[in-house]
Image (spheres, rainbow, N blue to C red):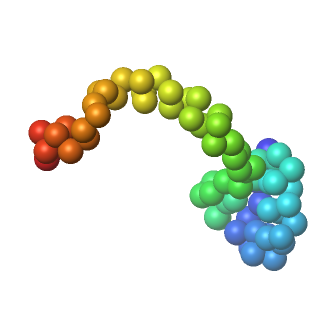
Amino acid sequence: MKKVSVRELHEHTGALVGEAAKGKIIVVEKRGQPVAQLMPLVITSLGARLRELRPYLLQLPKSKDSGKYLEKYR
């Protein structure tokens, strides 16, 4: 984990974002206190996300006419 000041972040934003994109976690400090964190963004594929949601989707009520269900719970 790398620590940088707000000033360093301002002066070297591109390089620091590049480091974070490669997997490094960067803590931004203001007057010696941590205030923010740069870290790599994890992007999951739609298929992976749907697999995660599948158990919840299977719990949804089965209905051929969603209008009746929506009217009931409005």
Question: Up-down: is 19 above or below 46?
Answer: below
Q: Find residue 68 and report its image quarter.
A: top left
From this view, report whether residue 44 is shown above or below residue 21: above
Q: Write the residue at 69% across / 59% down.
A: 28
Residue that sits furthest to the front in the current view:
64
Residue 15 position by quadrant: bottom right
Q: In the displayed structure, would residue 70 be above or below residue 58? A: below
Q: How many callouts does the rendering have? A: 0
Percent across and percent down for residue 45 are 68, 42
Q: Residue at x 65, y 64 (%)?
A: 31
Q: Please say whether residue 73 is visible from this viewpoint.
A: no
What is the x, y in percent for residue 8? 79, 70
Query: Is residue 9 visible from the viewing direction of this image?
Result: yes
Q: Nearer the viewer, residue 70 or 4?
A: 70
> Which quarter of the image is occupied by the N terminus?
top right
**Left or right: where does residue 62 sit relative to residue 31?**
left
50 sits left or right of 27 in the view: left
Closer-to-camera residue (18/47): 47
Q: Residue at image x 63%, y 42%?
A: 46
> Residue 43, how many percent across, how many down?
69, 46
Q: Position of residue 73 (x, y in %)?
A: 15, 40
* 55 or 8: nearer the viewer: 55
Residue occupying image coordinates x 75% and y 75%? 10
